[in-house]
Image (cartoon, helix red, strand yellow):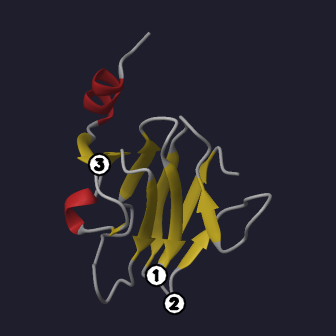
């Protein structure tokens, strides 16, 4: 079985560990694998006018352990295309699964993964 580090190197993603609680995505997160270790972590996707990610940017978010409650929220004006059976405004990531984000337009992202 391939390790997370080996997978990240194979697809060209660097690894970032975020030990804090809530944070807003920054350009340094672009094309990275972000391991979230804070117990309750909300990751905010900012407007393009604040953080100008290139269209095509990909970010992988992962709750690093069973204590992480990882949610992704969009700043007003940002559209995130995803389906969650329990919430249409916030994407909550299932424990020990990844959330994949891909910027598809100026203020629009696609999100997929095992969401609850």
Q: Distance from label 1 to label 3 (Cα)?
A: 19 Å
Relative height, residue 53 to residue 91 (above, below): below
In the rendered image, the vertical position of residue 104 relative to residue 111, given as above or below: below
From the viewer's perspective, tell me whether residue 108 is left or right of residue 88. Answer: left
What residue is disc 3 on?
A: 32
In this figure, which residue is indicated by the disc labeled 1? 107
Q: Residues within 10 Å of mark 1 (few under 14, many from 20)?
A: many
Location of residue 70 with respect to 25 vertically, above or below: above
Image point (28%, 78%), residue name: 52
Give residue 76's position: percent from left, percent from top: 51, 89
Q: What residue is at 28 percent from the left and 58 percent from the top? A: 30
Please state if 115 lies on the left or on the right of 63 as rendered.
right
| Secondary structure of the residue carrying numbered label 1 | loop
Instruction: Nearest to the eye among marks 1 and 3: give it.
Output: 3
CA–CA distance in space, label 3 to label 2: 24 Å
User: Residue 93 location, x and y as percent?
Assistant: 58, 50
As drawn, is 51 to the left or to the right of 75? left
The residue wearing badge 2 is 77
Residue at horizontal 31%, vertical 89%? 49
**SS at badge 3:** strand
């Amino acid at each position: 079985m391939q390790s997370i580090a080996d997978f990240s190197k194979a697809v060209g993603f660097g690894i970032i560990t975020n030990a804090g609680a809530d944070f807003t995505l920054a350009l340094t997160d672009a094309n990275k694998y972000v391991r979230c270790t804070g117990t309750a972590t909300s990751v905010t996707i900012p407007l393009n006018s604040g953080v100008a990610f290139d269209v095509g940017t990909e970010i992988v978010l992962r709750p690093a352990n069973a204590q992480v409650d990882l949610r992704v929220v969009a700043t007003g004006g940002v559209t995130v295309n995803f389906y969650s059976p329990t919430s249409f405004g916030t994407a909550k990531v299932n424990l020990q699964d990844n959330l994949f984000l891909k910027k598809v337009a100026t203020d629009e992202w696609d999100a997929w993964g095992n969401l609850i």
